[in-house]
Image (cartoon, coloured by chain):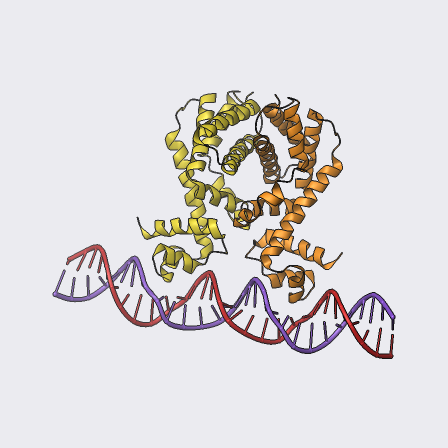
Chain colours: A orange, B yellow, C purple, D red
Amino acid sequence: MDKKSILLGTALQLFVVNGFHGTATSKIAQEAGVANGTLFNYFKTKDELIMALYRSVLKHMDDFIIERMESHSISKASFRSVFMETISWCLDNPLRYQYLQQFNHSPYFKLVTSKVLNQDEHPLLVLIQNGIDIVLIKQLPISFIYSIFTAQVNGLNSYIIANDLEKDKQSEFIEEAFEMVWKMIED
Amino acid sequence: MDKKSILLGTALQLFVVNGFHGTATSKIAQEAGVANGTLFNYFKTKDELIMALYRSVLKHMDDFIIERMESHSISKASFRSVFMETISWCLDNPLRYQYLQQFNHSPYFKLVTSKVLNQDEHPLLVLIQNGIDIVLIKQLPISFIYSIFTAQVNGLNSYIIANDLEKDKQSEFIEEAFEMVWKMIED
DNA sequence: GTAAAGATTGACTAATCAGTCAAATGTATA
DNA sequence: TATACATTTGACTGATTAGTCAATCTTTAC
């Protein structure tokens, strides 16, 4: 693994545990096994590291979901697939998930907006747009459906984590939660 | 207003804008119009201020909702009332809402848990328990329903804020979102 | 009026931090 | 081997920080 990836991985862990300003750049470099100055060869400032890590984690999630989408039709099954893969990613990548949440609710979030998020190639957004077009789901703004959908994922995820469910109990609630959200958005 | 309240109010604003570690205690004291040392008379450490502010904001929200609950029956109307008041509070108190979110997704969150949150007197939790008991809503764990309900509030709120809706458009979506969440949880 | 108790002050400290840079090390080419 | 180029190093700096405390001011009680 190259030094940049190691630095991003180390930063991820430390930021989630100690927060942004609670994590010194020197600590990241030390834990990553490189010199202090090396970090600043790869990331001009600490803020740039924080932003780069955010983009990297978003990409990791999107790649995971796109790669594993079962159905390419526009159907309940494809929504189910996106829902399942999203939850899977969150549960399999707790640090990355926490980092996204921490970042999204921090003052750093206002520094990104448009470019990073308004990606029309985002699988869920495309799916919702198509679902609305063929009157499979409710005639409401895409971003409204998107908010509802992702909020449901977050709610489910925080429930599973807070209650430390076993695998089979998890599956039950995931299935239940998807049926719930589908009932919400279907036309 | 007493100095403690002024300090809490100033801290709220600065923490939301600049983050926890991005806000110096000396800055809070300065903006609040008191000396540096005065802050530490009211809050032993910076962390204690952060925690006290969290509890204070939670209490503000609960008081608001309890005070304005229209119906004390166990009915769809009472769930609707809690939903509406919660959204109202979020929209009327953007700084406080943002602070809750920022705190909940920060490393500080793990320092609270049980005592602050497991309050059985929380209006929504009580309502859900009663709703399940009389088979008005689905026979699922209280905390699951709670997660779903609050997730819906968060999703709706982030949609309204991100799209900067006018008042009447807001009402439409709030109504729609409640009907959606009710469809999810009703038995 | 006065004395005791409590509240407020702000200069101060010891520690920590983001970012720099000249020197050292590694790598590729001819 | 020699030379050019890129990467890595870590000591260093100037700035900032949370928290302290002896001195000063304010309030209360009689």
Residue B157 shows in the view: yes
* Vertical side of B135 occupied by C20: above or below: below
**Going 52% across and 38% down the picture, which residue do you hit?**
B162
x then y, percent, for residue B56: 41, 44
Q: Residue at x 45, y 53 (%)?
A: B48
Q: Is residue B21 left or right of residue A42?
A: left
Q: Nearer the viewer, residue B101 or A120?
A: A120
Residue B129 visible: no
**Quarter of the figure that contains the C terminus of chain B:** top right
The residue located at (44%, 24%) in the rendering is B78
Direction from residue D28 to residue B36 in the image, left or right: right
The vertical placement of A76 against A62, above or below, is: above
Q: Position of residue A71 (x, y in %)?
A: 75, 29
Figure check: A172 above or below A63: above
A128 left or right of D4 in image: left
Q: Is residue A77 left or right of residue B62?
A: right
Q: Position of residue B18 (x, y in %)?
A: 48, 53
Residue A43, located in which quarter of the rendered image? bottom right
- The percent coordinates of residue A23 (x first, y second) are 58, 58
